[in-house]
Amino acid sequence: MAPSAMSMWTKSLSDAQPVAYWLDDPGRPHPEPALTGAESCDLLVVGGGYSGLWTALIAKERDPRRDVVLVEGREVGWAASGRNGGFCAASLTHGLANGLARWPDEIHRLEELGARNLDEIEKAVARHSLDCDFERTGEIDVATEPHQAAELRSWYEELAGKDLATGTEFLDTEAVREQVASPTFLAGLHDPTGVAMLNPAKLAWGLKRACLRLGVRVYEHTPALTLRPYGAGMAVRTPYGSIRARRVALGTNIFPNLVKRVRAYTVPVYDYALMTEPLSASQLADIGWRGRQGLGDSANQFHYFRLSADNRILWGGYDAIYPYGGRVRAEYDDRPETYAKLAEHFFTCFPQLEGVRFTHAWGGAIDTCSRFSAFFGTAHAGKVAYAAGFTGLGVGATRFGADVMLDLLAGERTERTSLEMVRRKPLPFPPEPFAWTGIALTKWSLARADARGGRRNLWLRAMDRVGLGFDS
């Protein structure tokens, strides 16, 4: 690596603040007061990210008379819901390839439910006036290596043969560079309607306001400490009080689940992102990107990138860091060595943007499970429901998960609860040191596959056969 190149990349980071761009907003709402004393309700929702917020909102929309309380350990949207890339995808299965591999008999129904779910999110944005920069601009998966281009074309042909390519378009080198001008792009697969861009923190804050307007009682800085049966319902203890509820929905995701047996199904993966300063009109013209689609490359160690409402570029992904023991700690949210790597990759993709600087650099934990997409369940004789394991594609899928949890708590057999994806769980992760060793070997193997034309080694083929994976 040439010292001058390294100097350029690191210089671009010299003013970057180690905070999530979306959360660094002067319009950030004040938190609601913490719970003090005793409360009771029909439905208690634990967790103030998307999973919990959608659950509380939909519960009130289904039955306005239902008494709903939501508690959040810190502030609404402060964790994964306020730190992600802002891609709101229709997919409920962490992409069509993962869904087709795991639930081939259900994939058409899963795709239909996912499209319907994204439509409902768009309607909710309008209905509740959620000011979150919602843009349904679609997404392009891009190939940056010859083997990736061949795989994208083959994948498109396979989807067309299974009647799953409706609206999707394969782009050759000239066509993809006409959409976005990067010398690294060799091909693309364009989905024009299945993904929306939005400001993730503003979505969380807007959902909170909508919940409050509908009568949900929201308590922030109120971690749920214990969960136990209490009469015909459940009781949750908090630092300054307690709540008795007929039903409880757990949307805590990567944080330790109050149903302890669920904890083995998820591990934290730390993902990192950069945000540039706003691009000028001439810089935008240099890269095109008039369609404002979300972009992601096709490598195993992939990048995702998109334009913000004020024409910054968010550039994230590649490194997926699993801390030994699966601990979630604030110190892992900042990783300068990954920021330097991401800056190098950014200027390789867009050399015409030399001189652009990054204003924000941040990270956060994703709740990953071994099948890459959410799983669901109940506990305490059906009085408690949970959803977890969204694996980085939860901006949209959490709304579907909220519907599933409410169906399960109602004891209803619905189109959603009858899905194999809902009825069955992924394989749990093994205890340490086996989890860390297996994940480290998988990461090494994925990087090696990227460097060897996509060829998967014996370890990856074995993981494929048993349905285990590791991803962000």
Image (tube, helix red, strand yellow):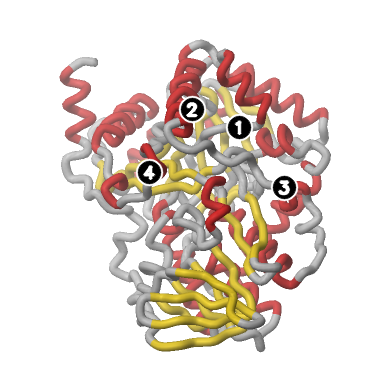
Which residue is under mark 1? 468
Q: Nearer the viewer, mark 4 or mark 1?
A: 1
Residue 382: image location, x then y, percent: 70, 68
Give the crowd class for mark 1: few <14, some 14-19, many >=20 residues within 10 Å: some
Local SS, label 1: loop
Q: Earlier in the sequence, mark 3 or mark 2?
A: 3
Q: Earlier in the sequence, mark 4 or mark 1?
A: 4
Q: Amino acid at mark 1?
A: Leu
Q: Badges 2 and 4: C-beta atoms under 8 Å apart?
A: no
Which residue is under mark 4? 313
Q: Amino acid at mark 4?
A: Ile
Q: Check the picture and name the quadrant holding the N terminus.
A: top left
Q: Badges 3 and 4: C-beta atoms under 8 Å apart?
A: no
Q: Going 30% across and 34% down the picture, which residue do you hit?
A: 338
Local SS, label 3: loop
Quadrant position of residue 316: top left
Q: Which mark is residue 285?
A: none
Which residue is under mark 2? 438
Q: Amino acid at mark 3?
A: Arg
Q: Going 24% across and 49% down the picture, which residue do you hit?
A: 18
Please tell me whether residue 343 is drawn above or below residue 455 in the rendered image: below
Residue 319: image location, x then y, percent: 39, 33
Local SS, label 4: strand
Local SS, label 2: helix
